């Protein structure tokens, strides 16, 4: 498969911005959204453990409930889709077992052949208390957020990462604690409104030589 031309990638990354105002009349087509869901599940993670779950909220009433605990930010109501990036709180040996079973199934290898990998993952988790393990899973989840934002840009979909919300309220409203999850960060996705004044603002970034050190 030929790679995407580098200039095309840069063009889309320059096009994207943290969309402040979405067009509430425009929805992401289901087939395109399905591809974005597939993209985020391809995000890398340590050991490939994927210690996360992505909660896609499209129900208008649920969005209205979440709006006040997101400091009444308009994106929550106006965007086509809202994704709540959650991390396992904490990841457990059962998650390791599920991952090992999945590897054996996908790669058609005996589960026993993965014993050393399983022991390594279990040893890593056992070295952390629950709080530290959740922080580790949270860092992994931010990798998935980055993949989601970049993929959305490449597909011509606007998105906005959002940390301005009350995680404990999201946990309560969405029943996340009972599922062993904790809300980490949000992303809204859809299409920018024509009147969003930030859409045409010049992107401000330091020059590569200012932030990249070559040794």
Image: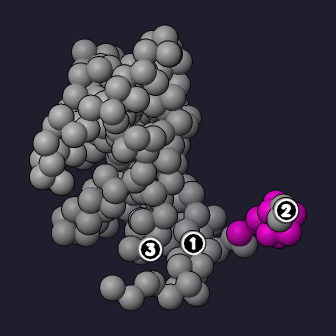
Residue position for label 3: 154
Which of the two labelled residues, at mark 3 and mark 1, occupies the earlier sequence position? 1
Q: Residue 209 colored magenta? A: yes
Seen from the viewer's position, the closer of residues 157 and 76 is 157
Residue position for label 1: 13
Name the residue at 72% across, 72% down: 202
Mark 3 and mark 1 in contact? Answer it, CB < 8 Å: no
Question: Which SS type dominates the magenta stretch?
Answer: loop
Label 1: few (<14), some (14–19) or many (≥20) C-alpha neighbours in 10 Å? some
Eye-nearest disc, 2 or 3 = 2
Which of the two labelled residues, at mark 2 and mark 3, occupies the earlier sequence position? 3
Residue 135 horizontal/vertical position (percent): 52, 25
Residue 81 horizontal/vertical position (percent): 32, 52
Mark 2 and mark 3 in contact? Answer it, CB < 8 Å: no
- In this rendering, is residue 39 above or below 117? below
Residue position for label 2: 215
Disc 1 element: helix
Separation of residues labelled 3 and 1 (CA atoms): 7 Å
Name the residue at 34% across, 56% down: 42
For the C terminus, the image quarter is bottom right
Name the residue at 49% across, 64% down: 150
């Amino acid at each position: 498969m030929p790679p995407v031309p580098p200039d095309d990638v840069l063009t889309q990354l320059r096009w994207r911005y943290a969309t402040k105002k979405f067009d509430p009349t425009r929805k992401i087509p289901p087939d395109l959204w399905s591809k974005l869901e597939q993209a985020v599940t391809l995000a890398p993670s340590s050991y490939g453990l994927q210690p996360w779950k992505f909660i896609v909220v499209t129900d208008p009433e649920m969005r209205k409930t979440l709006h006040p605990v997101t400091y009444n930010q308009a994106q929550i109501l106006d965007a086509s889709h809202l994704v709540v990036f959650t991390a396992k709180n904490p990841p457990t040996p059962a998650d390791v077992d599920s991952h090992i079973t999945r590897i054996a199934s996908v790669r058609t290898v005996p589960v026993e052949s993965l014993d050393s990998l399983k022991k390594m993952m279990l040893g890593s988790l056992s070295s952390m208390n629950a709080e530290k393990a959740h922080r580790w899973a949270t860092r992994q989840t931010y990798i998935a957020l980055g993949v989601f934002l970049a993929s959305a840009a490449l597909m011509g979909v606007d998105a906005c990462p959002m940390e301005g919300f009350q995680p404990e309220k999201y946990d309560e409203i969405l029943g996340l604690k009972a599922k062993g999850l904790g809300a980490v960060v949000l992303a809204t996705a859809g299409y920018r409104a024509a009147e969003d004044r930030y859409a045409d603002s010049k992107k401000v970034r330091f020059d590569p030589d200012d932030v990249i050190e070559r040794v």
